[in-house]
Image: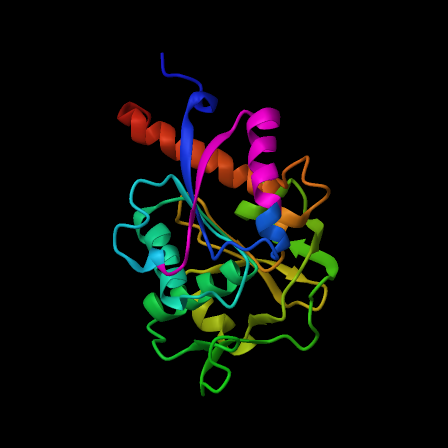
Amino acid sequence: MPEPLSTFTARVALVGDRSPSVRAHARIPGLLDALAHRDQLILDAYWIPTQDAETPDALHGFDAIWLVPGSPYRSEAGAIRAVGTAREQGIPFLGTCAGFQHALLEFAREVCGLRDVDHGENRPEADDLLIVPLACSLVGHQGVVKVEAGSLVERVLGAERTVERYHCSYGLSPAYLDVLRAYGLRFSGVDEAGDVRIAELPDHPFFLATLFQPELAGDGARPHPIIRAMAAAAVDHAAKRSSPTLT
């Protein structure tokens, strides 16, 4: 009989430039402990600076990649490579805040062929911005997110509406919605004004990106359902990697 999935330890890459001044980074160790003790989801997490993520084998052997907040990243190229590795290799992926923004940037460049699009925080002088300043900054704000029926995130949340916390000032330019959709990206959550807040890849084992920061939910004692779902996907990936008969 195969072992229960909870007995497998998953290796998770936390891609980002770790800093004690970033609240999300300070929250993550406690969330990992809570996942282990409350949910029996054991993650062996490694911080990978974005500059290190540029190297081809930096993310080899991981069961999930979490592109964490904290922009501007020291290496846009490393953040983009982390997204591409997860997308191309079927590795569970979560991108939050800046991770959401760079997930869209990678998809636009590498899948849609929009090689010249840029991020407004990284290159504000660029002519073709995919990621643009929000009309109103969401730093320190919270708001309603409406979730699309039948989506991955609806299954994860078990609801069609949620209230989430933000710490960002950049989002997707509406000019690119249709082309990203045409190439297979699903925008599965919007705010009350209809602006995109969640994206996912339907044909991927687990690929979810949120402009909000689920790691800031509550007091950290109960991991947000999205973080729990990422952890479960990582453990499932580890189980299948260790026991090929489970695939």
Left or right, 33 with reference to 58: right
Say which residue appears at 37% left-offset and 31% top-offset: 238
- 95, above or below 74, in the image: above
User: From this viewpoint, is residue 150 visible?
Assistant: no
Residue located farthest toward the top when viewing the structure as drawn: 1
Depth check: give the residue in front, 20 or 52.
20
Residue 14 is inside the magenta segment: no
Depth check: give the residue in front, 45 or 150.
45
User: From this viewpoint, is residue 173 visible?
Assistant: yes
Its colouring scheme is rainbow
Q: Quadrant of the N terminus?
A: top left
Q: How many marks?
A: 0
- 28, above or below 99, in the image: above
Q: Quadrant of the C terminus?
A: top left
Which segment is the magenta one? 27-51
Say which residue appears at 26% left-offset and 50% top-offset: 57
Residue located farthest toward the front when viewing the structure as drawn: 20
Q: Position of residue 184 (x, y in %)?
A: 41, 60
Q: Position of residue 215 (x, y in %)?
A: 62, 47
Say which residue appears at 69% left-offset and 67% top-offset: 138
Residue 33 is inside the magenta segment: yes
Picture quadrant of residue 53: bottom left
Say which residue appears at 63% left-offset and 38% top-offset: 223
- 17, above or below 219, in the image: below
Q: Position of residue 195 (x, y in %)?
A: 63, 68
Left or right, 191 with reference to 114: right
Q: Position of residue 87 (x, y in %)?
A: 36, 53
